[in-house]
Image (cartoon, rainbow, N blue to C red):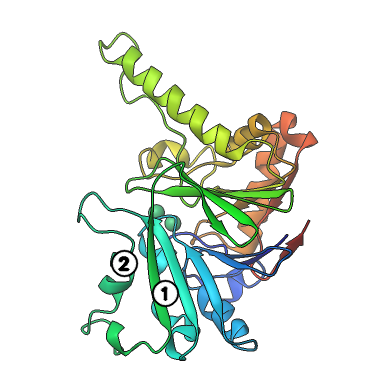
Amino acid sequence: MKIKFWGVRGSIASPGPQTVRYGGNTTCIEVRTDDDEIIILDAGTGIFPLSQSLMARQPVHANIFITHSHWDHIQGLPFFIPNFVPGNVLRLHGAYDPVSGQGVEQVMSVQLQYSYFPVREAELRGRVEYVTLTPEQSVRIGSATITPCLLNHPVINYGYRIEAGGKSVFFTGDHEPPYNIYQTGDPEYAEYQHHIEEKDAAILRGMQGVDVLIIDTSYTAAEYPSKIGWGHGTYASSFDYATRAGAKVLYCTHHEPTRSDDALEAVFRQALAEHPHARGLDIRLAVEGQVHEF
Ligand SMILES: [Zn+2]
Ligand SMILES: [Zn+2]
């Protein structure tokens, strides 16, 4: 299996000299199985250069799995170049949105409204198919099995576990470790605690024993108190998941858009120093353009 990071930035694309080493594109990860199936995790702005690279070998049969519908994870979708060429097929997978009552087709149709994009969906020349997924219900893509896992974010967010040829990877999308919203002593505390422990156990099952774990690691411990409930993780929470899941390699991603490369390296160094138990782990910062083969 091979993964390539095409976008590692959180919230908004952040190009420029301050972010040139780690990259400014928003979330997009290419996963290739040994059978050369193309599985794409999220369609942030990083999917634009990825889609250009795919045009060298047509027809393109791509499978995109959307973690959730926030802009930084879908914004590149209208620019997925194979969609403009007959013979190419895109199968778009994602969650049902209980707010709008629509399936994953919504993330395309919303963006292709004529006020916002000059090409209408009916004018796309490639074929686009939509697959709305249910938590814990696996789908097969060639030799790969992909299982969506419900994580914790302001909107429905699926983490995805991909298994193929005895290898595995898990990507969270955006995720904040669930926490108890009640005070200890509150009558609702115990029941809510039970609920989040069940949720956390399900998340850990999804991550268990993976070769590569890719986690939303937006904040430092110092930043987190003012961001509680925003739906993102910290270095500490990512190290903790990797330890408990027994992951072989941890990639921290969804880098804060205001963080320069130097600042990113500084907070990463500090987080490692603050968590000596994490020293036995193989922990890396995700870098745009980086390939990990395993
Ligand atoms: Zn995000
Ligand atoms: Zn989000």
Q: Is residue 282 left or right of residue 192?
A: right
Residue at 76 percent across and 38 percent down: it is 281
Tell me the quadrant of the picture where the C terminus can be found: bottom right
Q: Kindly identify the residue that appears in the image at 42 percent across and 43 percent down.
A: 135
User: Could you say whether the residue bearing mark 2 is in a helix, strand or loop?
Assistant: helix
Q: What is the number of the mark on residue 159? A: none
Relative horizontal placement of residue 58, taking residue 78 as reference (left or right): right
The one of 77 and 13 positioned closer to us in this rendering: 77
The image shows residue 142, relative to residue 266, as above or below, that is below
Residue 15 visible, this angle: no
Give coordinates of residue 219: x percent, y percent: 51, 46
Amino acid bearing label 1: Leu
Is tag 2's residue or tag 1's residue first in the polypeptide sequence?
1
Vertical side of 220 occupied by 23: above or below: below
**Is 125 situated above or below 65?**
below
Quarter-wise, where is residue 55 in the image? bottom right
Residue 103 rendering spot, x and y as whole percentages: 29, 59
What amino acid does circle 2 point to?
A: Glu
Pick the residue in front: 16 or 176: 176
Badge 1 marks a residue whose secondary structure is helix
Residue picked out by circle 1: 77
Numbered marks: total: 2
Task: Tell me what residue is drawn at x 51 percent, y 56 percent.
Answer: 256
For this rendering, which residue is in front, 143 or 283?
Answer: 143
Q: Is residue 158 visible?
A: yes
Hey, which quadrant is residue 183 in on the image?
Answer: top left
Tell me if mark 1 has few (under 14), some (14-19) or many (20+) residues whose alpha carbon lies within 10 angstroms of its own.
Answer: many
Name the quadrant where ligand 1 sits.
bottom left
Residue at (28%, 79%) from the top-left corner? 112
Task: Determine which of the numbered discs, if any, sits on residue 105 in the image.
Answer: 2
148 w.r.t. 52: above or below:
above
